[in-house]
Image (cartoon, helix red, strand yellow):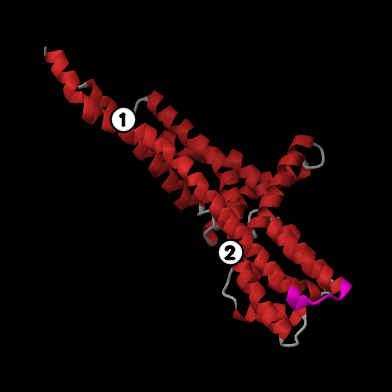
Amino acid sequence: MKIDIVIALVCTAVSAMALAFLFVKAVLGTARGGGGASGSSLRAILSPIALFVEHRRGRDVELNHTLERLDKFVVQSGGSFMDGATAAEVFSARFVFPLFAFAVVLPLGTLLRLSGGMTFMGAIFFAVLLYAYPESGLKSAAAERTRRFTRDLPGALDVMRLVAQAGGDLLSAIRAVIDVMPAGPVRDELARVVAEVAIGTSLAAALNNVAARVGTNEANAVFSTLSQSLEMGTSVAENLQGAAQLIRHAARVKAQTQAQKAVVNMSFPLLLLILPGIFIVLFAPLVIQFVNR
């Protein structure tokens, strides 16, 4: 009977964790972005605290480091997290969201007539979950956008190479990519390049800005090479072809590395889950016969 109760409690805890995760994703928005008016309302709540955080930015060294790290993730995510939340708003959310947990769970526990200890532990659980969500969600949004950018970049470089081989300059090739590429990080970044050039920024500087915003080794190699080709007058088409091949080669190497790690990752479930079951099936009858004797 006690074993059945333990199993039931474990299943309940796992279900509560899953429901908590789904609740956070639904209310606060997925890692890809917030939800329009709800995201704007959430930012309005965070704005007063975010202003105080910004005021303290230049006075607290540890806070400066934290906000600089969050600023990097905000730039890499393209402003897609929590309806374009700033680093200060994400930092403020880490302390505001746990208050939501207490404001919701404590009255709910009283309404359901749960014990005070269980209600308080549930509030603590949701508070910890909501404390960790803002930064982890921002990191996930940045990582997902970076992954999509790296995946779509070789195709964009191929289109740019065809335009360059046909006699167009690099800026015309970028405009061609914007016309044919579907919506995504690559198109957004290249459109930003065109916008920066339109207000007077040099094309080489705009390309370097893309590399700084994306922050990956592939983007640094590609856009630094393109900016250098503009400054030195080398063939843009050849550089585009070499950059596309470089990214595809890096993707193949990464896939091979992940495939090699898969064997090691599969060994842990094999040892912890599969082999114990096999041992039970093989040796349980022998143990039972020994005990009966």
Residue type at numbered disc 2: Arg
The amino acid beneath tag 1 is: Pro
Give residue 188's position: percent from left, percent from top.
Answer: 65, 69
The residue lying at 54 percent from left, 53 percent from top is: 256
Identify the mark nearer the N-term, 1 or 2: 2
* Residue that appears at 16% across and 14% down: 291
- Residue 38, how many percent across, how many down? 52, 57
Mark 1 secondary-structure assignment: helix
Where does label 2 land, which residue?
Answer: 151
Direction top: furthest residue: 293
Q: Residue at x 63, y 69 (%)?
A: 154
- Neighbourhood count class around disc 2 (C-alpha, 10 Å): few under 14, some 14–19, many 20 upward: some
Q: CA distance from mark 1 to mark 2?
A: 40 Å
- The reply to whether the magenta stretch includes residue 88 is no
32 sits to left or right of 274: right
Q: Secondary structure at mark 2?
A: helix
Which quadrant is the C terminus positioned in? top left
Tell which of 89 and 267 is nearer to you: 267
Is residue 218 shown left or right of residue 206?
Answer: left
Residue 156 location in percent, x, y?
A: 64, 73
Write down the quadrant of residue 53 in the picture.
Answer: top right
Q: Which residues are magenta?
A: 232-238
Residue to which mark 1 is pinned: 276
